[in-house]
Image (spheres, rainbow, N blue to C red):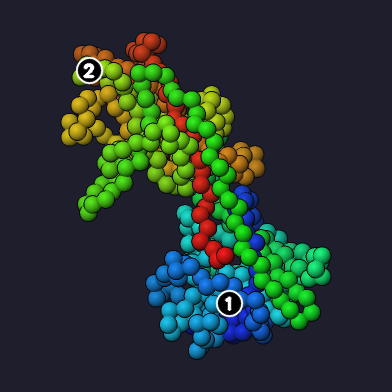
Amino acid sequence: MPAMMALLQRLLGVVLVCGVCAQQYWRQPQKHPLTPTFQKPQQQSKVPPPAAPLHECVLEEAEKIQCGAPGITVDQCQDISCCFDGHLCYYGKAVTVQCTRDGQFVVVVAREATWPPLDVNSVSLLDPNEAFCGPVDGTSAFAIFQFPVTACGTTLKQNDEGYVVYENHMVSSYEVGIGPKGSITRDSHFELLFQCRYLGTTVEGLVLEVNPVPPPMSVAAAGPLRVELRLGKGQCVSKGCLDDVAAYSSFYSSSDYPISKVLREPVYVEVRLLGRSDPNIVLNLERCWATSNPNPQSVPQWDLLVDGCPYPDDRYLTTVIPLDGSSGLEYPTHYKRFVSRMFSFVNSDTYAPQKDTVFIHCATAVCYPSRENSCEQQCHRQRRAAAEEVPPSHRLLVSSGKVILLKSTSHQKR
């Protein structure tokens, strides 16, 4: 860390702020080796950016990486897109792109630049042709890149105003889960498009742009009558509260759909039997799965529950919530609840994320207990006799409304 601090002081004491254009795309980059190279920046931009938002500057002392030279003023710190706590200028929880007058990109990517947080070790340039195009330093919370504007796949062009524009791309990789009928990811990822513009002795910054989330679409058709699938939206508001309990204290109504979730955010699902008062009958879930459109038979698909049990090939196993007399429900056997984690469908050939909507479906069965059949769904059994004994008339398919993936929330500087 001392070596890194010294490097940053030498690099960024008189650094120029470069403009950034960023977009959220789905790409899967190749990784490249780490071989640092350094050149000293010389002068600040004459067009200072706005101060960093306060939430970007809330870091633990141990996480702070010095930005600029020792003794820098608050105005000088803001001029290079960094945070100031009264005595130290440091990088915030954002993507900070700086350019120098001697032709260097300096890019600092924070783990919390998106939500869910990025794995900064997965971040790389799209075209790392030279060995020195990897990060020059970093921590678990930040990755630091520094390279010439003429290297690492940078493209050169001239705009109508006569500026010479150097442009490059940076992306993060992600892990893909592959199933028999579809593929998904729960990792946060993004593509950063950044530029430096030069005109004579002038270097100008560009405003950072993030693609807006597309507007919600209409609600999907409801499932069959008498069985209802709904999503919990309750939240803990008191100390000692349990999320898995509070979530089912209230539910999204039809007017709330489509609803938005971020990757890996819990999705609380409840399936319940309607209009029945027989305390002996049992509602079971034969299979629950997700698709990218309202048609439950469409592909891609991703299993959540199989025979009422978590799909074992999902790294983030669905959690089934047990219900009994302590649940407060009048007929606990008329309900099934489970928690899954939000994901995005990806192309099964290229593994490129492409589907930002999810619909949840459950095939349900109403079971009548008998001496031979308790109706209890037991996991890890190869075959479940109860499913074979349920008449077709007692099986129903129910579906959720649309759940939209809210692409990784950016906390980057504007």
Q: Amino acid at mark 1?
A: Ile
User: What percent of the width, then of the height, locates residue 315?
Assistant: 44, 44
Task: State the separation of the CA atoms marked 1 and 2.
Answer: 67 Å
Residue located at (44% from left, 69% from top): 54
Secondary structure of the residue carrying numbered label 2 = loop
Apparent side of residue 377 relative to residue 72 in the rendered image (left or right): left
**Neighbour class for label 1 at 10 Å: few (<14), some, many (≥20)?**
many
Count of marks overlaid on the render: 2
Task: Give me the residue at 48% from left, 62% from top.
Answer: 112
Tell whether 235 sits left or right of 292: left
Q: Which residue is mark 1?
A: 80
Could you say which quadrant of the image residue 350 lies in? top right
Nearest the viewer among 92 and 375 is 92
Q: Which mark is residue 277?
A: 2
* Outermost residue, bottom side: 71
Residue 374 vertical placement versus 391 (above, below): below
Q: Is residue 25 or residue 351 the one in the foreground?
A: 25
